[in-house]
Image (cartoon, helix red, strand yellow):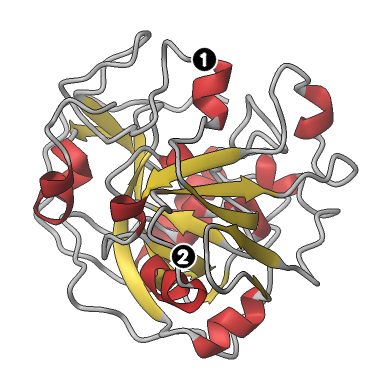
Amino acid sequence: MLIKIPRGWEISENQATPESGYLNRRQLLRAAGFLGAAGLAAGGTAGGPYPAKRNPDFTLDRPITPDWAAEGYNNFYEFNQDDKQAVKNMVGKFQISPWTVEVVGLVNKPKKFDPDDLARTMPIEERLYRHRCVEAWAMAVPWTGFPFSELVKRVEPKPEAKYVRFISVFRPKEMPGQVQYTWYQWPYFEGLRMDEAMNPLAFMVTGLYGKPLPKQNGAPIRMVLPWKYGYKSAKSIVKIEFIAKEPDTFWHRSAPGEYGFYSNVNPAKPHPRWSQRTEKVIPDMERRPTQLYNGYEKWVAGMYNGKEY
C-alpha cells in the first residue's frame, strides 16, 4: 500500500495528547486504508499493573501516536520483512505465556525471570518516548516498564562485565519470517555497553498504551532505547548475558557496512542508502527534522564523543 507523504508540513507545537483524542482520525484513516480491516492482535487486556502511573520527567515535543497506528505498523522481521502492516495479522500462533527470561554470564546472581512477575515486582511506570526507526519513520508512544538498571541490580554484575547481550526468541513454527528469510542468522541478538545499559533512559518494557505489550510490538518483554535506532531495542527477549567484550549484533553481522554497534540517532550520519536528516511521523508520514540522539542529548551525550556509530 502506498502512503502519501504530504508537503509543506510545519512542526506542531502541541504537547502530548491522550489517545482518545484521535478516535475520529482513527475512523478516517481506517477508511483510507492505513489500518487493515482484520484488526490488531494484542498480547492481552488491561489489568494488574496496567495502566501504570506516568513519569512526568519524560515529555514529548509532539502528540502521542494513536494506539492503532503504533500497534499496526511494526518492524518485526521474525514475521514479515516487507509489509509492516501485515505483522499484526501474523502473530496469532506466537505463544507468549509461559515465558522465561534467563540472565547469565558475568553476574554473581544468575536468575530466571517471568515477565509477569517482573511487571508486578519492579517499579513499573509509564514513559512517553519518541521512537525512531533507521528507515526514517518515527512514532511517539507511551511505554510501560521499568528502568533496566533495576534488573541489573538484582543479578549483581561482576567488575569484568563491560557489555550486555540480548537474545530474542527463536520459534520458527510460530514466527514465519525465521523460516522464510534464511539469509539472516536467527535468533535476533543485540548488545549494549554497560554504561548504556545503566543509563536512566534504558527501559525494559512489558506494556504499551496502558495494557500488556501486544505481540507485534515485542511481547511479552523487550528493551526500549529511545536515543538509538529502533533495531537496537531487542524484542521478545529470552536471554540476557553479561560479557567482557563487545558483542556482535544481528544487523552488523547481516550488513556490516550499514549498521554499527552504537547506532545512535544522528541526522549528520546518513545511512549508505538514504539520508537521516528528516523523519516521517506515523501515521500521516509528515516530515520533520531529525534530532541528534532523537532529542535525548542531555541524557546520553556524555557517554559518547559524537563519532560512534
Q: Where is residue 116 in the image (x, y as percent from the top left)?
A: 65, 80
Is any part of residue 144 visible from this angle?
A: no
Camera-side residue of 23 and 166: 166
Left-right relation of 82 to 107: right
Q: Position of residue 136 (x, y in %)?
A: 34, 28
Q: In the image, what residue type sits under mark 1?
A: Ala
Left-right relation of 260 to 217: left
In the image, farthest residue toward the right: 173
Q: In the image, what residue type sits under mark 2?
A: Met
Please tell me in which quadrant of the rendered image residue 266 appears.
Answer: top left
User: According to the image, label 2 marks what residue?
Assistant: 204
Please tell me in which quadrant of the rendered image residue 5 appears.
Answer: top left
69 w.r.t. 75: above or below: below
Badge 1 crowding class, 10 Å Cα cut-off, few under 14, some 14 to 19, many 20 or more, is few
Circle 1 — which element? loop
**Which mark sits nearer the N-terminus, 2 or 1?**
2
Q: Position of residue 289 (x, y in %)?
A: 15, 32
Camera-side residue of 149 and 290: 149
Q: Residue at x 62, y 60 (%)?
A: 104
User: According to the image, label 1 marks what residue?
Assistant: 255
